[in-house]
Amino acid sequence: MHRIELLAKSHDRERFDCGSELLNLFLKQTARQHAERGISRTFVLVDEDATAPIPILGFFSLNICQIKSESLTPGEAKKLSRDVSGVRLGRLAVAKSCQRQGIGKTLLVAAMGKFVEIFNMAGGIGLFVDAKDRDAKCYYEQFGFVPMPSNELELFLPVKTIQEALTPHL
Ligand SMILES: CC(C)(COP(=O)(O)OP(=O)(O)OC[C@H]1O[C@@H](n2cnc3c(N)ncnc32)[C@H](O)[C@@H]1OP(=O)(O)O)[C@@H](O)C(=O)NCCC(=O)NCCS
């Protein structure tokens, strides 16, 4: 079984390898600093009974963001004020040895759950993500993310889609 928790000193950041050096470096060098400075929060997925140094199987980071509603589709924009807030899924990565086992999906669902917690406290129109390339874009699209009109590698998952995805279907 796995659990998802805030990145802490007990996690083995050094050995994480998702195949993207930029994402590896973010986890090793930046994620904890960002958390301390209030820039973003990073959550890691680990084996439930692992002991320190705990191997990281995957991670994602979140931060609050501001968006001009004119950057959304006209249909979305007309319902909103000019400046709105959302949550950015800044990074998402799974260790190479664990890819294609559903961990990315588990992390995305957890990120949606965190978004709902923030939404319930302070609002927010949805989750935003910058896909690093077309493969990543396709990955996000299968979960309902839609490309922004101004930049197809920036994608948006509206609050309504998130709530529907997290509502258990009878
Ligand atoms: C992209 C990434 C997060 C996906 O995580 P994962 O745990 O391997 O993916 P999942 O097992 O949840 O995949 C679910 C489905 O998504 C699709 N999928 C998986 N990886 C994909 C990719 N790179 N591109 C497009 N679709 C992909 C598949 O349809 C897969 O189902 P299948 O295995 O039954 O075919 C992971 O491969 C990764 O960390 N890659 C390197 C870093 C990266 O590209 N991060 C994206 C941030 S921009």
Image (spheres, rainbow, N blue to C red):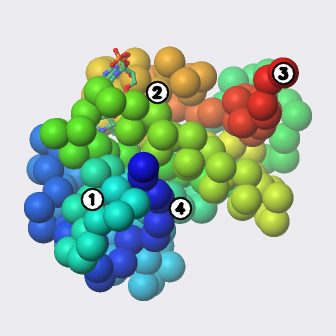
> Viewer-nearest of labels 2 and 4?
2
Q: Is residue 56 visible?
A: yes
Residue at numbered disc 4: 63
Q: Which secondary structure, mark 1?
A: loop
Q: Is the C-beta separation of discs 3 and 1 under 8 Å?
A: no
Is disc 2's CB within 8 Å of ligand 1?
A: yes
The quarter of the picture where the C terminus appears is: top right
Q: Which secondary structure, mark 2?
A: helix
Residue at numbered disc 2: 140
Horizontal side of 169 relative to 96 (left or right) equals right
Local crowd size for mark 2, using a 10 Å CA cut-off: few (<14), some (14–19), many (≥20): many
In primary-sequence order, the first of circles 4 and 1 is: 1
Query: Camera-side residue: 9 or 156?
Result: 9
Question: What percent of the width, then of the height, locates residue 134?
Answer: 31, 21
What whole-number distance in Å separates the C-alpha atoms at marks 3 and 1?
A: 34 Å
Q: Point out which mark residue 170 bears.
A: 3
In primary-sequence order, the first of circles 2 and 1 is: 1
Q: Point out which mark residue 139 bears.
A: none
Residue at numbered disc 1: 56
In primary-sequence order, the first of circles 4 and 3 is: 4
What whole-number distance in Å separates the C-alpha atoms at marks 4 and 1?
A: 20 Å
Q: Looking at numbered disc 1 in the image, what kind of residue is underneath it?
A: Ile
Q: Which secondary structure, mark 4?
A: strand
Local crowd size for mark 3, using a 10 Å CA cut-off: few (<14), some (14–19), many (≥20): few
Judged from the image, the quadrant occupied by ligand 1 is top left
In primary-sequence order, the first of circles 3 and 2 is: 2
Question: What percent of the width, then of the height, locates residue 127?
Answer: 61, 43
What whole-number distance in Å separates the C-alpha atoms at marks 2 and 1?
A: 22 Å
Q: Which residue occupies 68% across, 43% down? A: 126
What whole-number distance in Å separates the C-alpha atoms at marks 2 and 4?
A: 18 Å
> Viewer-nearest of labels 4 and 1?
1
